[in-house]
Image (tube, rainbow, N blue to C red):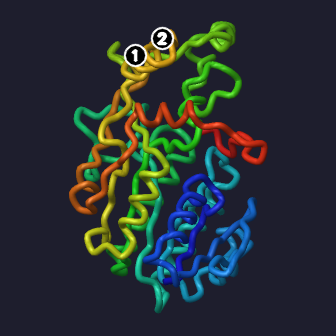
């Protein structure tokens, strides 16, 4: 096996490489990492190719002799990069894959931005045949286009593609800072947009937890997945016959309920809930298909995610650095 990994320096990429290289099943496997802005240390089993996804020569070099592709690289809200990197890059990878004599599987990591996250309403749990409803912005648009592109390559050329659609991915102390009212807040929504900058600043000085309400007034339910569970799903789909040309939602068994989070943090850490009305929708990303077809089970529920986030202690060599806001 020779697997090309794009986005290898991100949170999912690094976690996957650790799990993959430590797995005895892949002791003889090689990894090619196509890196552009951030570097990665090469090794006996890891080859680093420097270049952009928009560069046909770099992609061709990286794809040489590859049996599997794991495509995770993405650009966020960067309109100047979207076409060249996200769309052209995906096209170049797919073209190289369909013409390859060695390729066995192409795995794409997508996101729940393709189904609107908390910005679009669904009357039932969101499964793999629910309509795509991207929220505003170029990032969500690129993810919809990527899903459609790999789907069409499967139809047109018989490509063995697998898509894992993940919601907001948590690692280390991410969840703690996703709930923070301070300047170190990770991801959105920006509290200043909902409650004003002055109130957010006051709350940041105390032990408060946001209890967001959806547009119906019920506590907001929002989808998450821990990086460890996503990596388990990635390992599960490699060469899995049931993953051929399939799309899977990879999420926690239930969405995170902000009322339950607030109650748990009040009980375990004496934090006080702050009610925040929002225009958002509560949605449920249904993972039934992945559990049934892959035998995959998420291990981290919201309580475990809280405990891991609050227990995590960063060393000086592991500063909190957010490459993308969410």
Q: Is residue 183 above or below residue 255?
A: above
The image quadrant that residue 117 belongs to is top left
Q: Is residue 161 above or below residue 146?
A: below
From the viewer's side, name the closer residue of 19 and 32.
19
Q: Position of residue 300 (x, y in %)?
A: 40, 42
**Is 232 on the left-hand or right-hand side of 79?**
left
From the viewer's side, name the closer residue of 250 and 56.
250
Q: Secondary structure at mark 1?
A: helix
Which residue: 52% across, 53% down? Answer: 142
Q: Is residue 187 above or below residue 278?
A: below
Which residue: 69% across, 81% down? Answer: 57
Which residue: 42% across, 45% down? Answer: 112
Disc 1 to disc 2, C-alpha distance: 8 Å
Quadrant where the C terminus sits is top right
Q: Position of residue 44 (x, y in %)?
A: 67, 81
Q: Which mark is residue 263?
A: 1
Confirm or deny contact between disc 1 and disc 2 (CB under 8 A): yes
> What is the tally of numbered marks visible in this picture?
2
Residue 96 is at least partly visible in this image? no
Q: Nearer the viewer, mark 1 or mark 2?
A: 1
Which residue: 40% across, 37% down? Answer: 223
Q: Residues within 10 Å of mark 2 (few under 14, many from 20)?
A: some
Q: Secondary structure at mark 2?
A: strand
Residue 38 is at least partly visible in this image? yes
The image quadrant that residue 230 belongs to is bottom left
Q: Which residue is mark 2?
A: 273
Which residue of the protein is positioned furthest toward the right in this rendering?
316
């Amino acid at each position: 096996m020779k697997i090309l990994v794009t986005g290898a320096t991100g949170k999912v990429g690094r976690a996957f490489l650790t799990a993959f290289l430590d797995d005895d099943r892949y002791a003889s496997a090689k990894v090619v990492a196509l890196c552009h802005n951030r570097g990665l240390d090469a090794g006996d089993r890891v080859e680093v190719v420097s270049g952009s996804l928009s560069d046909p020569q770099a992609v061709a070099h990286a794809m040489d002799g590859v049996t599997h592709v794991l495509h995770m690289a993405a650009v966020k809200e960067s309109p100047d990069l979207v076409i060249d990197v996200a769309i052209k890059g995906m096209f170049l990878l797919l073209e190289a894959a369909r013409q390859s004599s060695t390729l066995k599987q192409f795995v794409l990591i997508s996101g729940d931005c393709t189904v609107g996250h908390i910005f679009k309403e669904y009357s039932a749990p969101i499964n793999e045949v629910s309509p795509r409803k991207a929220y505003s912005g170029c990032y969500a648009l690129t993810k919809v286009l990527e899903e459609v592109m790999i789907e069409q390559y499967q139809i047109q050329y018989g490509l063995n593609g697998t898509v894992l659609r993940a919601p907001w991915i948590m690692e280390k102390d991410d969840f703690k800072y996703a709930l923070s009212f301070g300047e170190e807040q990770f991801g959105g929504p920006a509290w200043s947009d909902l409650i004003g900058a002055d109130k957010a600043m006051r709350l940041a000085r105390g032990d408060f937890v946001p209890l967001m309400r959806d547009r119906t007034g019920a506590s907001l339910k929002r989808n998450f997945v821990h990086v460890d569970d996503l990596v388990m799903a990635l390992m599960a789909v490699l060469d899995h016959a049931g993953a051929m040309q399939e799309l899977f939602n990879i999420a926690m068994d239930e969405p995170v309920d902000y009322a339950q989070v607030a109650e748990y943090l009040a009980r375990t850490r004496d934090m006080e809930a702050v009610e925040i009305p929002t225009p958002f929708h509560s949605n449920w990303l249904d993972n039934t298909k992945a559990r049934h077809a892959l035998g995959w089970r998420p291990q981290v529920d919201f309580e475990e995610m809280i405990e891991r986030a609050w227990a995590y202690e960063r060393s000086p060599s592991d500063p909190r650095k957010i490459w993308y806001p969410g």
